[in-house]
Image: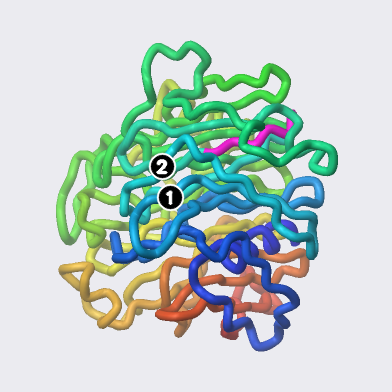
Amino acid sequence: MRCLMKTLAAFLCVAALPATAVADNGTLVNDSVLDPLAHNFPTVTFSVATVHGVSFQQDGITTYKGWQYAACYQGNTTNSTGKVEVGRRLLPYGSWQTLVLTDYNFTTVDSHNDVVLGICPGDGSIHLTFDHHVSTLHYRVSVAGLADNPTTTAWTAAQFGVVKDRLLTGGPSAMTQVTYPRFIPTPAGKLLFTYRYGSSGGGDEILYEYSGTTHAWSLVGQYTTRTGTYIGTLTNQTDRNAYFDNTFFDANGRLHATWCWRETPDASSNHDILYAYSDDTGRTWKNQLGSNISTTGTSFISANSPDIIGVTIPQKRNYINNSAMITDKQGRVHVVAWMLPAASPDQTTFDTALSSGSRFVHYWRGTDGVWRKNETILTGSRAKLAADDDGRLFLVYGDATNIRIAASNPATNPEATPASSWND
């Protein structure tokens, strides 16, 4: 239920769209607004009009020791300026306490540039990154223990350090070309930080780790590479980048990752659902057969790594990157991707995706290692996916005016038959 509440709250409390629809077997129990003036774009960028609640934001909101924490940009809808705002509240119905970090001004109208928040379980420090799209790192961290003692610690901007352009203390140079930063708390009480180094169609994934004991970051290393050969229906390439859906620890401490490859800046070159996992906090990575395919910092996951394709999806299928991913109680991996229905012909430009009837398709990897498919009739913006302790899945997504929640109950034998229909 922790994963469910965190994901749903990320949309209902932070996103700019109103939450007016829920699954027909659900009940809205509470609305909570962090800031009614949270920054929104006056114009659309990259087909998205908001920088909050986007699918690749891991995370904009999180729960820690009974308190909820969220980050956004404070601003207005008439210009592109805004400052990072951080809020906290006691669950389930506490009022938001907010602070604004006034020494950095967000000025780029770009829906990639979300605020990402992470909390280290080892020392209760709160970490923030913001305003990135192939740009220099913007990072700041709170004093240790800020999230451990919320009833006795002041909630002020003075609790956060200055904006930094690197993670390593005394690092030799700024971290550049940062896109899609993510914080991932580990079961051992540390905090991972991963990001893409490079640009769309040509980038590598880099991993760092923060220790709650030393209060310092260390470089783990690169773990995916742009190199390798791919022969596709749209283009043939020797470099690319991985677009991760999510990078997520399950209840047993296994780190799962799913992604697509993009061969060029054109989204029509997206292809395949790739899958790998790590049992040692990202130091080594294994493919679907359990074979080692990468040692972080030394050898990398590439397009030519064996047995990493979970689902073959060719180019020109309007398959959007940064899909929704979660693991369930049984350890199964679920991905809900947005793409053309199987019966639709290929599209040569991604601009035709909406008019051609693209929709959500649910894929999952059973405990037997086999991937299965359930094509839904739902369509909308890129989504978030959550699972509860009873095995139900919840898809949170937006349409033109609303945030919607669709629910799917597990089938009697979900390893052998498709999940039941999604109810919106």
Q: Amino acid at mark 1?
A: Gly
The residue lying furthest to the right in this view is 152
- Residue labelled with disc 1: 82
Q: Amino acid at mark 2?
A: Asn
Horizontal relation, residue 185 to residue 39: left or right = right
CB of mark 1 within 8 Å of CB of mark 2? Answer: yes
- In the rendering, at what x and y percent does residue 121 appear? 73, 35
The answer to which of 193 and 221 lies nearer the viewer is 193
Q: Residue at x 58, y 83 (%)?
A: 21
The answer to which of 160 and 124 lies nearer the viewer is 160
Q: Residue at x 61, y 32 (%)?
A: 160
Whether residue 203 is visible: yes
Horizontal relation, residue 386 to residue 226: left or right = right
Q: Is residue 330 magenta?
A: no
The answer to which of 248 and 342 lies nearer the viewer is 248
Whether residue 8 is visible: no
In terms of secondary structure, where does tag 1 sit? strand
- In the rendering, at what x and y percent does residue 317 appear? 28, 69
State the extent of the magenta-drawn residues as a range.
Answer: 123-128
In terms of secondary structure, where does tag 2 sit? strand
Q: Residues within 10 Å of mark 1 (few under 14, many from 20)?
A: many
Q: Residue at x 75, y 46 (%)?
A: 64
- Residue labelled with disc 2: 105
- In the rendering, at what x and y percent does residue 269 appear? 23, 57
Q: Is residue 124 magenta?
A: yes
